[in-house]
Image (cartoon, rainbow, N blue to C red):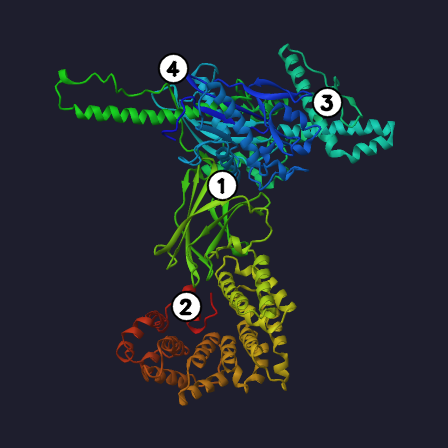
Amino acid sequence: MKGKHNSLCVGIDLGTTNSVIATCSVENGMINTPVSRIDRCKDIGNRDNRRIESSELLPSCVYYQDMKDGNYDPIVGDYAKTMSFTQPYAVSRSIKKQMGQPKVNIDGWKKEYKDLTPEDVASRIIRHLIASLEEYYNEKIEDVIITIPASFNSAQSEATLRAAERAGIDISLENGEILLPEPEAVIYNVLNQIQNGKINSTIDFSSNKRVMVFDIGGGTLDITLHDICRRKGNLNDFDFKPLATNRFSTIAGDAFDDIIAELLYEKYISYYERQSPDIAKRIRDDYSTVMINLVNHAEELKLRINNKYKDRMKRGNMLLEDEEFASGGYMPNGYTSEDTVTLREFEECLSPLLGWDYKYDDYKRFDEIIDDQNIIFPIIDVLNKATEKLKEDEIKVDAVIMNGGMSRLYLIDKRLTEFFGFKPITVIDPDKSVAQGAAVYHYYIHQDDSIKTSNMAYMNQTSEHMDSSPASKPSFRDVTPIKQVASIRAVSSGVLNESIYLGLKGGGTCLLAGIGQDIPFASDVIPGFTIAPRQKIIRIPIKQQTKDGKFQTIAVGNISFKRAMMVETPVSIRFFLRRGNILAIEAWTSSDSSGENVIESGAVTLSIGDIDRNRITRRHGQAMNPPSGTNLVIANELSAFKSHIDKLKRSRNRNDRRHATERLAQMKRAILNCGNPEEFADRMLAMLRQDRSSLMTMYLLPIARKLSVYWSEKQLADLSKICLSVLSMDLLGGWIAEGKDIAANSEAIKTVGACGITSDCEKLEKLCENIKYRSPLLYAFGRCGSNHEWIYQEFLNDINRSRPIQDSLRAVGLSIYQSRGKTLNIDIQKLTEDVCRLINMGAGALHKNELSIAIVTHAMLICWDDADTNGEEKYPICDISTVYGPEAYTYTQKSRLFAEKLIGRGELTEEDEAFLLGVLTDDVL
């Protein structure tokens, strides 16, 4: 922001109910933060004459007045708030609650208003504040600090940043630096007031203190926990570090007004039901309009009770529970609302929002808490997060700073005092504290720039004269170092209140940053993602996980590469979190999974415009395929799998079929490499029962077979039964399968073998005469460890007829592996001789993959008879390097090491077992 600085040092509190703008000045070594009075329209006369008044608090309301020419004139402030009672469809009120959403959510909102998004409306309010200040000082203002709730997510912060830009604020230099979390602003203001002697703090900050900020305004509740400490040797300099922030909460002033309004509504309806049921019905039918006006009466009642309660307390007089207060008043529908509310009724209706059932130690059982619609739950949330971040079993809060307009309510002070066991610190003016703190922060960041510039010039001039005599040294009247009046510094600019995730294909997610992550933050490079062939645009959904475990998309970004990759291509990403949860992402394609051999890179611009769209259009690209080990959403993954199978069934378009085939292959890889393979069993079985078509069987059974290592015995039995049903026509005979049916049946045969149920596998012997099924049958019998005689005979036939040996050789190795400890009806010694002879025939007999299979099979056969210790000498194999060459020698190195370990009676690890099955079959994960 250097070079754009305006010495006013402006801070803006863009509030839910009211907005405030403050400036900063330094007098007598103290930082003063006067709040500016803002002109606004108070009323409009019959001739459209506007009565303009000025006040420090500007209602955060915008009214879109219907003009005679068909246009709409936006009016900000008091008049807009007044019109919200009669024309709620034309007034944006509490728009801060909607920041981050794709459009204004108000019944009756018209596209002719032009301001269609929450940030459009917010920019009107910001612009009005700045324009009033510019007119007063007669100078351009582009350099300001705007506060946001610490619980704002990235989308909400981005929306606020865009609102500032549309209001004419320069955000181009330090993107995100113009945003300041509201509790942090409160701390800047409170510590500044302590420095100025306006707040007498009894807290000794010479040692580290845990301070909680409880900032409750009209629309949002912000709670943060900080470590605060004076810097050694300086009573006026402070360091503070955010530790934890609550989840975004709107249990604030508006929620209190709403629940009081419900009480008034019940009294209102009850009265007219006694007078006239017809009138009561009309009131019910117009509930939304009625409630808008009752909320206004509720706010007046709240203030009236609060003022009287606190004034009585100052005099030492208690307000009695049965004391009555007049409530209600004029209603636009013509049916006046007039009644009374006792103090007891007032307190009882608000009791649920105060969370009286919760105690301080309840943060230790945070996961058990269900009710989050009260002001105590966010405190417990913060305490729970802080203990997890600090790895502490117990956490102590030394002080609580209470801020925000709603903090004036006596019930808030009473509840917090009871909860913490001590009275909170109350700021001097809670309506203005946030804006004032933002102005102080603005001063400090520019003071830092000035100090750096001045001190650098001072040091440069000093170094130029270091060799001069004392008499010739300059007086430095023109360049002297600047000294700060005081210093308040945040060690970090915030903490992440909710974990954020990158959305992936199939509903999967990848954690980007966890709860409690200090901000700013730059991640390491995250490799392992991939994009589909011919894909040029990558869709980047950013998600948050809610307390109930669901994922919610909060922002969407796209990255466009210059050219589409012709093959599935590795992608790596890196992300950054800046002040205010501003998120930035870089992505690049590479030629390897490490992400180092960069092909093309680009930055991601996040937007919130696509969040409410239910489908992903091609224009916005596709999300990335997840890295290995990512947990997938089973329902989403298999639903997408089925849709591509259906596309293959019905489509005759060549490109569509190719795309579907590619997607099925990608999904297969993703499922096989996911982090939750055991969770697929039941849904896969259901899909196979429902659809036993050739295409479904052909594509889904290979996945089920590979995942079957995680399945229960019952699930394996169900899978085997389904496969036998697929094969029923062939097993009955008289039917000749062709085309896709052959491929589907082959997968079913192999899957029966993988299930390992001997009785089911024996039923496949009827198919041995069909040459089309020879390869899958060899696999099935070998995998199940059955029909050894047939496997051995096929192996001998392949040797004697010089046929490809891989299938039968694998079957021999598998059958030996699966039959350990059993009695075989074959001559093991003869089989060992045959395998040994095959290996020693040389490179013309075996290629390197077959050689690897033969080596491990040879070792297993030697070890078959534990009593035979001279097997390696009886059945020696040739020198692989000499007979097969260096390439085969290198390729088979791991197989040879495994064979040596096996023959040497070494104990096999799980990794050894996995390697052995990996050599003998490609179905092991």
Q: Amino acid at mark 3?
A: Arg
Residue 579 location, quadrant: top left
- Looking at the rendering, in which quadrant would you find the N terminus? top left
> Dot 3: what SS?
helix
Specify whether residue 505 is in view: yes
252 or 179: nearer the eye? 179
Indicate whether 450 appears above or below 642.
above
| Residue where numbered disc 2 is placed | 915
Dot 1 falls on a residue whose secondary structure is loop
Q: Which residue is mark 4?
A: 29
Badge number at residue 515: 1
Q: Residue reaching furthest front?
A: 69
Q: Are marks 2 and 3 in contact (CB under 8 Å)?
A: no
- The residue at the point 36 percent across, 30 percent down is 2
Q: What residue is pinned by disc 3?
A: 344
In front: mark 2 or mark 4?
A: 4
The answer to whether residue 14 is seen in the rendering is: no
**Which of the marked residues, 4 or 1, is nearer the chain's N terminus?**
4
Left or right: where 92 falls relative to 805: right
Residue 75 horizontal side relative to residue 181, left or right: right
Secondary structure at badge 2 equals helix
Amino acid found under the numbered disc labelled 2? Phe
